[in-house]
Amino acid sequence: MSYSFEKKATDFKLNDPALLDLLDAHHARLRFPKFSAHIAFELGLALREEFAARYGDEESGRKAMQGVKEGLGAVMAIKLFDGQQLFACSIGKAGATTADNWTWVNGKEAVVKRTGKASFLMGRLFEIQGRKPEDKGFPFPQYACHGGGYPIWLSSNSTGPIGTILVSGLPQAEDHQLIVDTLVKFLPTLEK
């Protein structure tokens, strides 16, 4: 199965309706054949590595890719809807993240849990419809309809996702795209 995509979420303007088609394609194709605590941990490490390769990591001494803004940071988590947190970390420049990032993570998780869709998709959908999330029952900070909350779907389950992959700290399209790019590389390793 091919997990790759021709375009990235970061290629679109945030209010471009064509972005919704791409985000729907992400949901349709980026599904796990299986999932476990071990897989979550390995995925978390892959997500962390993808961040470090792009944006650098002060603690490990890695520099950002050429042309990429330095000094960024992010928090990451992988959680199941039964309450288990299987992975969590901060990465990037010291002081670039705060406790507020974890508030955003919790809000993004709530959006995914309630809708079964990526928090970025829901935020873009509301904006394109000319609606505010608060007017549709998604008040901030309880809900954060911004990029960085992604559902964990099993390919064998069409009922609903089982958890979330979460990133907060980058511009919202980049939070989302970091997850997608990690999944594009990671999911084929589960088919072996």
Image (cartoon, rainbow, N blue to C red):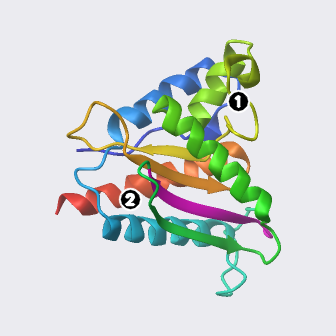
Q: Secondary structure at mark 2?
A: helix
Q: Amino acid under label 1?
A: Lys
Q: Residue at x 32, y 44 (%)?
A: 31
Vertical position of residue 16 compared to residue 170: above or below: above
Please tell me which of labels 2 and 1 falls first in the chain. Answer: 1
Residue extending furthest toward the front: 82
Residue ID for mark 1: 13
76 within the magenta span = yes
Q: Position of residue 28 (x, y in %)?
A: 35, 32
Q: Amino acid under label 2?
A: Lys
Q: Quarter of the image for the C terminus: give it.
A: bottom left
Q: Which mark is residue 108?
A: none
Q: Nearer the viewer, residue 69 or 140?
A: 140
Q: Position of residue 103 (x, y in %)?
A: 72, 53
Q: Nearer the viewer, residue 65 or 109?
A: 109
Q: Is 137 positioned to the left or the right of 166 in the image?
A: right
**Residue 122 shows up from this direction:** yes
Q: Residue at x 36, y 60 (%)?
A: 186
Q: Quarter of the image for the N terminus: give it.
A: top left
96 within the magenta span = no
Q: Main secondary structure of the magenta part?
A: strand
Residue ID for mark 2: 185
**Magenta segment, which residues?**
70-80
Q: Residue at x 59, y 62 (%)?
A: 76
